[in-house]
Image (cartoon, grey):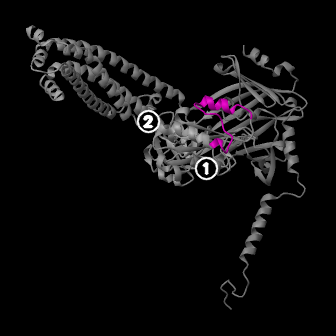
Amino acid sequence: MISSGISPSRPRRPLLALAAFLCLLQALAAQIPAGTDFTALLKKADALVTFPDTDFSAEYTFVQESPGQGKSTKQAMVFRRDSENTYLIVMVMPVEDKGKGYLKSNDNLWFYDPVSRRFTFTSAKERFQNMNARNSDFTRSNLAGDYKVTSARWEALGKYQCWVLDLLATSPEIPSPKMRIWISDDGLARKTEDYSLSGQRLRTTAFPQYQVVGTRFVPQTVVILDELRGANINGVFVKERTTYTITRPSMQSLPDATFSKAWLEKLSD
Amino acid sequence: MVFKVAARNFTRNARRFLLLGAAVAAGFFVICIIQSLVAGVTNQINERGARFYGGHLVVLGYQKHPVVSARIGDDRPVLEAIARSGIKPSIVSHRTHEGNGLVFFNGEKLAMRRIIGLDWADEGPAIRQMEFVSGDPDRMKDPRSVLISEETARRLGAKVGDEVVLEVEREAGAIDTRNLLVAAIFREASIFGYFTLYMDRRTLNSASGMDADDCNLIGIYLDDYRKAQAASTRLLAALKTELPTFPPLASRDDFYEARSADYQGIRYGTMTVRGFLSEIGTMLEALTMVSYGILALVIVVVTVGIMNIYRVMIYERTREIGTMRAIGVRRAQVRNLVLAEALMLSACSIVAALGLSALALFFASRIQLAVGAGFDIFLDRGHLSWFINGDVTALDAALIVLVTLFGALGPARAAQAIEPAAALRSD
């Protein structure tokens, strides 16, 4: 008997087969074990890099790479008190930016210019010192409060096995209404991608290494790639990039006066 | 008979009147030039302003609660008010204006001063009047299309057909983006276009989080911008019968003050292009006042000049007048003769000045002026813009004629008083 491989008598159910295949694909992709609490995972990721019971200070060194324009380096001292949702940042390098500062107190954020000796309101969404970091990147992490998980899958990111969570902002006030985050099995965020509402990727942030400070973690290096800003170099689109390293982290308590306009003015003198 | 003799005297002794005629013509020429330029600039600003603001006259809506925003909401009561007001719009536009937005292309970024969402089906005929350097503005029928300025294109390195990314920040802060295709590139280096972007209203609404059919304002294009103020008053009265309104708004400051009060719901107001550009309007009014100042100066100079020259002229023509009187010409006829000559002098001077100023303006407007962006608002595609306003010119001409007659009246009376016998005895 010669068979053509297609039996005319065998019933074909392509829709059913396609549905089964898609279900299988989805199951493979998501691999969400029953009972996995992703909100708890986000809370853990927040908790590991937040300092609710101590103050935090460190030296941040930023390297801005703008394709075709070269590199520039800036340095700042960052002082954080997460329990009061406040921070103070003062620029120490380069000379022309020395003394410029930011003071965040709850929802208010002021920028201080030592030349005019004036404080002006600025926004957490604004770019920090015209780099690819935002002013909001220096505040405490609140992923669990700002986002809800819409989907999840388990995948490898370099040497890390990560949960990849698609997040949707819970409030219209969150600048990145959509986010994708890679959280390794130790609970630390390893990579994030910020998206606009329409799904345009705006920014990719990588946290390749963390340093341990007491019982908490602080990234050693953060790499931010701007997905829209850059330049065509020899026909290849090269993105703008900000890399910042955090050194001399400390959890020593700071005087209350640290988080005040007066102190920022004094530092700038 | 008097006019016939006057015409003969005027043509046969043209040299006698030449200097005086030149003086009158020079004065009228200066007035014509200034007023035509001011009228041209005013016309220019109003037409370009109309394309920028959405019409020669716009209805603004503003709400304070639950969020502060410029919005019209339900447009039906506004459209009904326009119909009730008796205004005959050439176009009624629905506009969404966004103040903040970034455009990205190939890694380059540019902050836009204004993002204009419009309905191409309605406003296409008006927007097509802009100067396009490349592309086809009619591609704006596609809701994913965008019109960008030449300066924006240059800075981004974008061309027609390229896809740019528009990033807008919603009222609450969330960021949204739209990928848009460059349909055409327009040339507009003034405040009306340097960093302005035109796109589909519904596409912009969806990006900025507004309802698809909502808009910030409803604009009205008129066939003559000079009717805008009267139309604004009538429209406000019509709006007031059905909707809560602001008091009359003469400028943006008026609008800011009116909307600062706390109130519920949406309030509506009307504003003309002149109101939006009150600073420029004030400057143009100042220029108009300067032109009237010059007109006053010309009047004084012409009056004094005519008086003096006519006195000399009458003195020189004593024997001629005496002869006329001796052969039976009456005193009144002598006076009318002198006045008729003055009338002809002024009429000829005005016609000559009008022709010369039109010629001068025509040639001046052919010159491509390379000026800074700040001055471009006064130019039409880089050229001087001018417009001879018939009503104003007729009024100026009538004034010059009256002044000439007034200046000649004294000498004419002196001429009619000349006694024939004494005149014939004189040298």
Percent coordinates x, y for residue B89 in the rendering:
51, 47
Q: Say which quadrant the C terminus of chain A sits in.
A: top right
Q: Say which quadrant the N terminus of chain A sits in.
A: bottom right
Around disc 1, counting alpha carbons within 10 Å, would you say few (fewer than 14), some (14 to 19), or many (20 or more)?
few
Q: Which residues are magenta?
A: B239-262
Q: Residue furthest bottom?
A: A1
Secondary structure of residue under mark 1:
helix
Residue B124 is one of the magenta-drawn residues: no
Say whether residue B293 is left or right of residue B417.
right
In three-dimensional space, the C-alpha distance between marks 2 and 1, rounded to whole angstroms, equals 29 Å
Residue pointed to by mark 1: B80
Q: Chain of mark 2?
A: B
Q: Name which quarter of the figure residue A231 lies in.
A: top right
- Give the amino acid at mark 1: Glu
Q: Name which quarter of the figure residue B248 lies in.
A: top right
Percent coordinates x, y for residue A95 in the rendering:
65, 19
Residue pointed to by mark 2: B43
> Observer-nearest residue: A58 or A138?
A138
| Residue drawn where x is 54% and y is 48% of the image | B92
